[in-house]
Amino acid sequence: AKYVQIATPACPSLGQKSISMHVLRHSAAMRLLRAGIETSVIALWLGHEQVETTHIYLHADMGIKERALAATAPAVATPGRFRPNDKLLAFLEAL
């Protein structure tokens, strides 16, 4: 709470969010992962007992998935993320 209060003047939206130690740990892990740090190093830094615990961060980042797919996609495939049309979104929201 102390650091959220300090950071809020620079980023006012923080004052409206619920930020816990878990959120800070998760954010730090995601930043390390995006920077290319190995999951085993992140696991040690976070104090995870098993490296597998850290693998959840791999599933949380769409950018990592997109880079992995781009590295394995055939050259004829059109790269990009699926963008549903309004009709599909309306159907899904009605469920």
Image: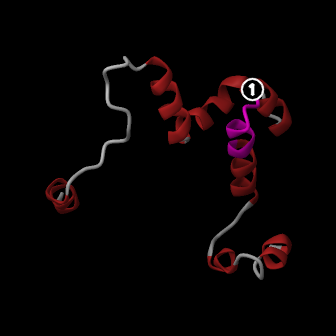
Please determine whether, in this image, residue 42 is positioned above or below residue 11. above
Amino acid type of the residue tagged 1 in the rendering: Glu
**Quadrant in which the C terminus is drawn:** bottom left
What residue does disc 1 label?
38
Q: Which residue is drawn at 48% across and 34% down?
A: 66
Q: Residues within 10 Å of mark 1 (few under 14, many from 20)?
A: few
User: Magenta segment: does it hold 70?
Assistant: no
Q: Residue at x 62, y 29 (%)?
A: 55
Q: Give the percent coordinates (x, y) of residue 63.
A: 53, 39
Q: Give the percent coordinates (x, y) of residue 84.
A: 24, 50
Q: Residue at x 81, y 28 (%)?
A: 41
SS for dot 1: loop
Residue 30 shown left or right of residue 69 in the figure: right
Residue 82 shown left or right of residue 35 in the figure: left
Q: Give the percent coordinates (x, y) of residue 89.
A: 22, 57
User: Magenta segment: does it hold 35?
Assistant: yes
Main SS of residues in magenta: helix
Q: Quadrant of residue 39?
A: top right
Residue 64 shown left or right of residue 7 in the figure: left
Nearest the viewer among 62 and 22 is: 62
In the rendered image, the residue lying farthest to the front is 76
Identify the magenta region: 30-37
Please determine whether, in this image, residue 26 is positioned above or below residue 76. below
**Quadrant in which the N terminus is drawn:** bottom right
